[in-house]
Amino acid sequence: MSVFLAPLHLVTRSLRWDYLIRHEKKGVPFYSFFAANTVGFTVNAVFPGRLGELVRPLYLAQKENIKKGFCFGTIVVERTFDTFTMCFFLGVFLLARPLFISRFQAGAEGYASLRLWGIVGLALTVFLLAFILSMYFSREKTLAFIARLLKPFPEKISHKVLAISEEFICGLKFFHSMQNLLMYTLYSFVVWLGIILLYWVFFLAFGIKLSYFLLVPYVFLTMVGASIPTPGMVGGFHYFSRLGMTSLYKIDPNLAVGVTILVHALQIVVTSVLGYAILWKEGMSLFQLKRLGEKAEP
């Protein structure tokens, strides 16, 4: 079941991404979103620096002839809402703690980690939301400021950067409607509830029986670890996964290490197999992805 659930987030992320892209271009096939997400996460699994976050919008821009800057803007929105969603879930979890305190007796270290990283995540989300909202609602001032910064550069370069910046800001235009905000928030809830489901099923495979809702803080910590820009989330994911299991659920450290290694390997292998299959179908390789964007509209 875990193998089949591993690519679920690619499906839900693709449906969510479509909701943003349709403001620029309607009728984009689901496969294009799925392929872009899968190839992007495959790149993240192999190369450092989260390069897949650049590949995803470039891949979609080339495949569907969409403005590159617009696609980049949607990725910033996506990652901001990822953090916001898990901070929201963690907040609800901590507020509801008295309802299940007998089933969740985490140690002081566990709660300290949750509070610390919850505050960091919330602060980052508020900063990013404020930044992108100010960019969108002060579009002319933002573009004028960027133009002043580009004055020392050749006109050809500055013109291209300014054009991409304008497209990027257009990628934020869904903020103009409260209905869009609520719908995208709902899509984000679906994405992360599906990710929690994957871990819940995987834990059951190891005989670790926890309520679905009790996995919220663990998934939050793994999200923090996965955000560290190492190839394939190696190191950060493992540290925070083990920390979550041992400090939140009192799981034996050896079992925690084994579960962490296998759940990480499962996600990497399934995603990479799908990613390589898509690249093979497109007649490309990971090292040829630099061609992305050459045919996209500048």
Image (cartoon, grey):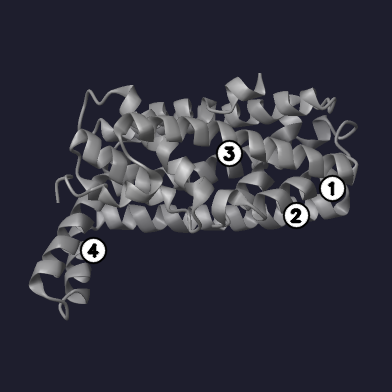
Q: Nearer the viewer, mark 4 or mark 3?
A: 3
Tag 4's secondary structure?
helix
Q: Would you say the residues marked 2 and 1 are in contact, meaning their CB atoms lie under 8 Å apart?
A: yes
Which residue position is annotated with label 3? 268
Which residue position is annotated with label 2? 113
Q: Would you say the residues marked 2 and 3 are in contact, meaning their CB atoms lie under 8 Å apart?
A: no
Question: What amino acid type is highlighted by mark number 4?
Answer: Thr
Q: Position of residue 276 (x, y in %)?
A: 44, 35
Tag 2's secondary structure?
helix
Q: Position of residue 235 (x, y in %)?
A: 67, 55
Q: How far is mark 1 from mark 4, CA to CA?
A: 45 Å
Q: Nearer the viewer, mark 2 or mark 4?
A: 2
Question: What amino acid type is highlighted by mark number 3?
Answer: Ile
Which residue position is annotated with label 1? 247
Tag 1's secondary structure?
helix
Name the outermost residue toward the top: 1
Vertical arrangement, residue 286 with respect to residue 158, above or below:
above
Q: Nearer the viewer, mark 1 or mark 4?
A: 1
Q: What residue is rendered at 58% in x and 56% in y?
A: 228
Which residue position is annotated with label 4? 142
First in sequence: mark 2 vs mark 1: 2
First in sequence: mark 4 vs mark 3: 4
